Image (cartoon, rainbow, N blue to C red):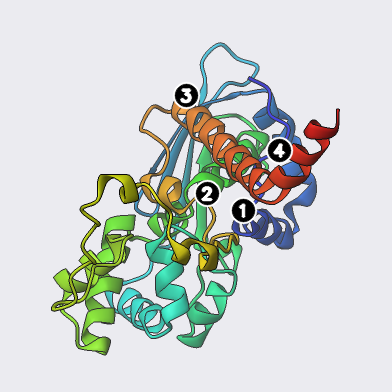
Amino acid sequence: MARHNFGSNWWTKRWLDVLESFGWASRLQRGRTYARQGNVLSIDLTAGMVAAKVQGSRPRPYNVKIKIKPLTDKEWDRVTTALAGQAAYAARLLAGEMPEDIETAFAGVSLSLFPRSTGELDTSCSCPDWANPCKHIAAVYYLLGEKFDSDPFLLFLLRGRDKQSIIAALREKRAAMTGVSVATATVAEEETEAKAPPGNPPPELPCDALAFWLAGAGLAAFQVHMHPPAVPRSTLKRLGPPPLGRSGREFYQLFENYYREISHRAYELAFNAGEDDTSAAGT
């Protein structure tokens, strides 16, 4: 399947910009065509390692390996402490969103989320091309960007920590900082509806069947304020793409489009319904 782009989020663009900053712009361009044509047959990510198969001019696909220097346990402890110390970072990450200024948090503890030099990348390809990156490695770089676009936590995985480890560390550190237990903090994150405070039960409904369906005077003062969420499509981002390879990514992107379209349509109905009804009445 041909591709036209490899991500729209800032962290994906940042990933490609970092690679180009190493003087690889022309080499990456060679791999872009391969990536667009679907020549990357498979790509698997583990902690600090990417293994891929890329179809070249020969019948047998080439084996590509990309290793990125992972952070040590002590370095990750510094990073998660810095992230947990800022409520905005923690909230966005727990919702599956990559904060735009997350590099500031890494820099604050003298570390980096993205590779800072070619020395942090160890790559190999079974093709005969002497250039590094060859077009097969470059194609994998682009497909990595596509994966990062769907799941930003894969950037952390390449640095040695998976999503579950990051979330657990953030919850534990946030709980320690706020004096709230981890279990309580977890429940608070997942609850979407506020509970009535103790000793303040909801009002009793009228017993009169005729008055039961009357709106009452309070409805006139009821107002709904619609605004975009702080983290768009947070539920979808928490779930991530299903583990179905390329089909899973396509399914995920399809549902992202559905979420976006439904949100847009709901906004239109909320704010244009009156105008539509008026124009329809006049025709």
What amino acid does circle 1 point to?
A: Thr
Query: Who's the residue at 35% across and 60% down the image?
Result: 160
Identify which amino acid the numbered label 2 is placed on: Phe
* Label 2 packing within 10 angstroms: few (<14), some (14-19), many (20+): many
Picture residue at 21% right of the left edge, 65% below the top:
187
141 versus 13 height, above or below = above
Q: Residues within 10 Å of mark 4 (few under 14, many from 20)?
A: few
Indicate the quadrant containing the C terminus: top left, top right, bottom left or bottom right. Answer: top right
Q: CA distance from mark 3 to mark 2?
A: 16 Å
Q: Amino acid at mark 3?
A: Ser
How much space separates mark 1 and mark 3, taking CA atoms? 20 Å
Residue at 23% across, 80% down: 175
Label 3: few (<14), some (14–19) or many (≥20) C-alpha neighbours in 10 Å: few
Residue 209 place in picture, x, y as percent:
26, 45
Question: Can you say which quadrant of the picture contains the N terminus?
Answer: top right
Closest to the observer: 195 or 39?
195
Query: Disc 2 marks which residue?
Result: 148
Residue linked to disc 4: 5
Determine whether the residue tagged by mark 4 lies in a helix, strand or loop. loop
Percent coordinates x, y for residue 89 in the rendering: 46, 75
Asked whether the beta carbons under mark 1 and mark 3 sit within 8 Å of each other, the answer is no
Are discs 1 and 2 less than 8 Å apart at CB?
Answer: yes
| Residue 146 seen | yes
Whichever of labels 1 and 3 marks the residue nearer the N terminus, that label is 1
Q: Earlier in the sequence, mark 1 or mark 2?
A: 1
> Disc 1 and disc 4: Cα gap in Å?
11 Å
Circle 4/circle 2 CB separation < 8 Å: no
Q: Which residue is mark 1?
A: 12
User: Label 3: which residue?
Assistant: 247
- Disc 3 to disc 4, C-alpha distance: 17 Å
